[in-house]
Image (cartoon, helix red, strand yellow):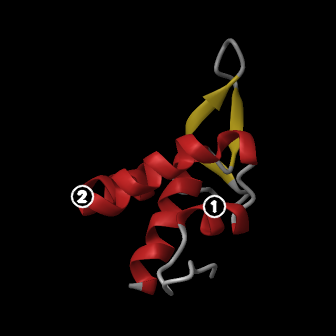
Amino acid sequence: MRRGDDGAANVGGVLEELGVTASNRHTGDVLVEMLVASPSMLRKVRQDHRPDASGHCRSCRAGADGSGRVMQCSLWLASEAAKRLLAAE
């Protein structure tokens, strides 16, 4: 896990480890910080957006008609980053 100079877990570093692109990192940082601050929200996101056996989100749909399924949705990735940060504390 990436840590800052002070030894604290680094949100950006965790997002990078999870494959979140630099263009989405600011939004991811804000979302992760919100999830870290709200354990009930974190539990709900992890419950609703956990991947199925094929790695696709159980809740998110892609495409204009919603027929496609999203692989590793951004909410799941943010919740995984928040979980890792909380575990590192």
Q: Which residue position is annotated with label 2?
A: 40
Secondary structure of residue under mark 1: helix
Real-space Cα distance between discs 1 and 2? Answer: 21 Å
The total number of labels drawn is 2
In the figure, 27 relative to 48: above or below?
Answer: above
Q: Quadrant of the C terminus?
A: bottom left
x and y percent of residue 68 in the render?
A: 72, 29
Q: Amino acid at mark 2?
A: Ser
Sequence order check, earlier mark of 1 and 2: 1
Place residue 5 in its image quadrant.
Answer: bottom right
x and y percent of residue 64 in the render?
A: 69, 12
Place residue 14 in its image quadrant.
Answer: bottom right
Please name whichever residue, 5 or 88, is drawn nearer the observer in this view of the structure: 5
Question: Is residue 58 at all visible to an observer of this figure?
Answer: no
x and y percent of residue 33 in the render?
A: 39, 56
Secondary structure of residue under mark 2: helix
Question: Is residue 33 at all visible to an observer of this figure?
Answer: yes
Please name whichever residue, 73 or 86, is drawn nearer the observer in this view of the structure: 86
Neighbours of disc 1 within 10 Å: few (<14), some (14-19), many (20+)? many
Q: Amino acid at mark 1?
A: Leu
Residue drawn at (71%, 69%) of the image? 17
Marking on residue 15: 1
Marking on residue 38: none
Residue drawn at (71%, 62%) of the image? 16
Residue drawn at (28%, 60%) of the image? 37
